[in-house]
Each structure stands twice: as C-alpha cells, then as structure tokens.
Image (cartoon, rainbow, N blue to C red):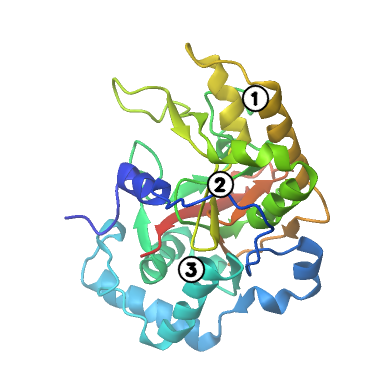
Amino acid sequence: MTAYRSFAEQALHYFIRPHEEIPSAPISHPANWHGPAMAADPSLWLVEFSPDDVAELESAADRARGEGIALAGLTRESFPLPGLADRISRWWQMLASDRGFLCLRGLPVEAWGDELASYIYWGLGHHIGVPGAQNAAEELLGHVIDYGEEADNPAVRRYRTSGNIDFHCDAADVVGLLCLRPARSGGQSRIASSVTIFNEILARRPDLVPRLFHPFRLDRRGEEGEGEAPTLDIAPCAFAAGQLRTFWHCEYFRSAVRHEGVPPFTAEEKALLELYDQLAASPEIYLDMWLQPGDIQLISNHTVVHARTAYEDYPDPGRRRHLLRLWLSLE
C-alpha cells in the first residue's frame, strides 16, 4: 500500500461533491472575500515559520533519511511534527472551511537545496492532507518550470511553459506551490474567490446561474488512459450545507470542442464562460501574490481559482523559475 493517492483516486475524491440545490440568494461564507481587502491585511493569510519550526522540519527530515525512507515512502508517522501540530490544524481549517488560502513563509530553501526542500515539503504535506499523484504518469511533485513547450498548443499543460495561465482549479482539494526560485520578471500568482465570483454572476446575470450546475466537457489533454474518452463531463458548481464547491477550467472547457462529438457552445454557455473569466480577472476581486523563495502557497480548489501571469526567465538554467506543486486531499 502506497503512502499517497493515485492520480485517479485523488481526482475521484475531489470530484465527489454533494449537491442539494441551486442557490437563489448570495452565499454568505468566509470564502466570500475580495482581493483588495486581503491585500490590505496580509496578517489574515500570511504565516511565518519560526526558527523552531524550521529546526523541527529539518530534524524530521534527518530522522527519516537516516532510516533510509525515500520521499515516496514518507508518512505522517515517519515524519513527526509535534511542535507544529496545533498550527497545522489551524491551517487545515483555513483551507477547509474558512477563506480557502494561505501563504507559509520562511523556509530556507536556498540553504537546503532542491532535493532536501522537496523531501521536507512532501513530508509536511502529509500533515495537512493526503498527498496524491498529479498526472497519469503518477508524478508526485509537479515541477512548474518552462520546458520550452508551445503555450497555445491545446495538447500542452500550460504550467510547462512561460506563458500566461488563465484562472482555473486543479483536480485536488488543495494545491500547494513551494517557490524554489522566482522568474527574472513576471510569473505573478493571482487568486480569486469562486464564491465571490458566483455571487457577482447571481447579481448580474441570474439567468446564467443554473448553467453552472450542469456539466461542461473538460479536455483531458492527453491524461486519459488507453481506451478512455479524451473528455470528461464536469459540472462547474455544486452546493450543499451552505457551501459552494467549484471546479473551473475555462481553457480546458473551450479546448474540449476540438474532439470529435463535442458540440459547439451555445450562446448561453459562451456568455457564462466570458463573464466568469471577466469577473475573475477584475482587480476588485483578485489578489496578487508574489511568491518568494521558501514561500508555500496553499489554495482550496473548491473555493479559490488561481492564475499566473506570463514571465521572462534568466538565461542561466540554475537561476530559472522553479516551483514545486503538491496536490492534497483533505479528510
């Protein structure tokens, strides 16, 4: 038995979302926030690691590596963090039932080097949730770097390019990004509350709201198994017990129409796609976050959509932008 979920298990856990009704009134929830208010008070979402925290993480890594445990074999028990336990519990609550995002700052990744930073990051992840693979190749930590691939190719996942990435969700309860090295310029992380976006759609175009609760075709971008369909039917929203859960990936919705048998969008669907992306890209709604080396950004894919601006990298390969992506299921 592995100490992490497979790609299929992770996605299945995420997409099983209870649904009771379509909300007819604005949703009141801590995840209903606006970017300018969050930017004005970073203490609401920015957490600093103390020297004692860093020492505990290093000690856990030293112990596990001393026992010969590889990264993929780490568990919560083999990577104990008793001193951080109470704080991690609060972080979990922030992701699961509060604003849906936070930034952990202060890991000495430059001193650690990429290998140790990856090991500690994976070990810490086990205390926040259940880590899972991120693609059909069962990659555990995604390397968000520019592989030189064509950003506008619909068969390419954009994190492998230096191009702009539109607002979207990943197929896991939580996505984490550890910054090892930022770009020379650009590459800004941008997030927005999907609850706030929903409330704005309800206020501006209530006629479009029901369409959010019916499936769109999602382009699988080559991640399907042999003999499987190249698209999935995914409803963007589900609502139960007062909580809205959203999966939004407009680019993958749009590119699904390249596949045989996928019908073109209706006028209503085009209007919804355009309005959703327009709202997410509004400075009145989104929050910009410049990730520094050693920052871990944690985002709930149920209540937050995220994007990235295009970037220019350093010519030196050793200085190029490099983030480590972690997918987690919350239990």
Secondary element at image label 3: helix
Residue 315 picture location, percent across and down: 68, 41
Q: Is residue 148 visible?
A: no
Quadrant showing the C terminus: bottom left
**Which callout, 2 or 1, points at the residue further toward the start of the chain?**
1
Q: Which residue is mark 2?
A: 169
Image-quadrant location for residue 204? top right
- Lateral position of residue 217 relative to residue 133, left or right: right
Q: Residue 182, position in %: x, y?
A: 66, 54
Q: Amino acid at mark 3?
A: Trp
Circles 1 and 3: CB atoms closer than 8 Å? no
Q: Is residue 288 visible?
A: yes
Distance, label 1 to label 3, CA atoms, is 35 Å
Give the residue drawn at x 29%, y 22%. Answer: 226
Of labels 2 and 1, the one closer to you: 2
Residue 102 drawn at (x, y percent): 60, 68
Taking depth in this image into account, of 56 and 309 the one nearest to the observer is: 309
Residue at 75% across, 69% down? 38
Disc 1 packing (10 Å; few <14; some 14–19; many ≥20): few
Q: Earlier in the sequence, mark 1 or mark 3?
A: 3
Q: Which mark is residue 152?
A: 1
Cα distance in 3D space between marks 3 and 2: 30 Å
Q: Amino acid at mark 2?
A: Cys
Between 303 and 124, which is closer to the camera in this rendering? 303
Of pointers 3 and 2, the one earlier in the residue sequence = 3
Amino acid type of disc 1? Answer: Asp
Of 148 and 204, nearer the camera is 204
- Residue pictured at 36% horizontal, 58% vertical: 131
Please name the residue that numbered disc 3 is placed on. 112
